Amino acid sequence: MKFELVTLAGIKVDSDAYEVRVPTLAGPIGIFPGHEPLVSVAKPGVIAVRYAKSDNDDKLEYFAVSGGVVEVTKQGVRVLVDEADHGDDIVEAESKAALEKALKMQESAKSQVEIEQAQALVDRHQVRLNVAGLRRRNRK
């Protein structure tokens, strides 16, 4: 099936895939060829892609994504998000430092807007750390 991951910056992935796991508001879903058509809200989280049926878990490709929309058609799956970071592009130490900074921002927030902005940063960097950890474990 065709898999497209599209961000505000452009197309991140446009490839054939056997399985795509996407975080949605209703919970994570696994999409395989022949999946029923659907449109759903994607929440911030990890997208995992298996390109070939014979690929082991250590060959999964991971992306940290912000929320967006998932569209499944008979031809494939398209995920539209604000941003997506490939697991290989995430520096774990930088993400840990950014998460700590976001948590401090959250603690010192004085308005609802500041709290929401800080929470969005916390969520983003927690997802990035999850992806970095998955990539590290599966590469060993």
Image (cartoon, rainbow, N blue to C red):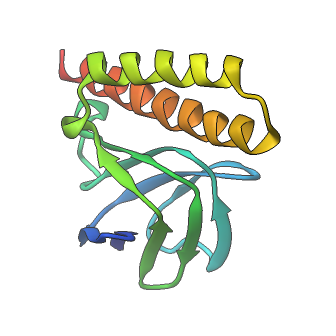
Where is residue 10, by image quadrant? bottom left
Tell me if 55 is positioned left or right of 121 in this view: left
Residue 53: percent from the left, percent from the top? 29, 52
Residue 112 locus on image (x, y percent): 81, 40
Q: Quadrant of residue 38?
A: bottom right
Question: Which residue is at 68% across, 68% downward?
Answer: 40
What is the x, y in percent for residue 128? Answer: 41, 33
Q: Residue furthest front?
A: 110
Number of numbered tags placed on the structure image = 0
Residue farthest right in this picture: 112
Q: Nearer the viewer, residue 106 or 58?
A: 106
| Residue 68 in the image: above or below residue 102 | below
**Residue depicted at x 32% and y 26%:** 132
Query: In the figure, is residue 126 to the left or right of 88?
Result: right
Q: Residue 80: percent from the left, percent from the top?
A: 48, 70
Residue 103 or residue 93, whichever sits in front: 103
Between 9 and 80, the one nearer to me in the picture:
9
Q: Please give left or right for residue 8 compared with residue 110 in the image.
A: left
Which residue is drawn at the image coordinates 50% and 38% (left, top)? 124
User: The C terminus is located in which quarter?
Assistant: top left
Instruction: Pick out the residue farthest to the bottom.
Output: 74
The residue that appears at 24% across and 55% down in the rendered structure is: 52
The image quarter containing residue 139 is top left
Q: Quadrant of the N terminus?
A: bottom left
**Residue 35 vertical position relative to residue 129 in the rendered view, above or below:** below
Q: In the depicted view, which residue is nearer to us: 101 or 39?
A: 101
The answer to whether 50 is drawn above or below residue 120 in the figure is: below
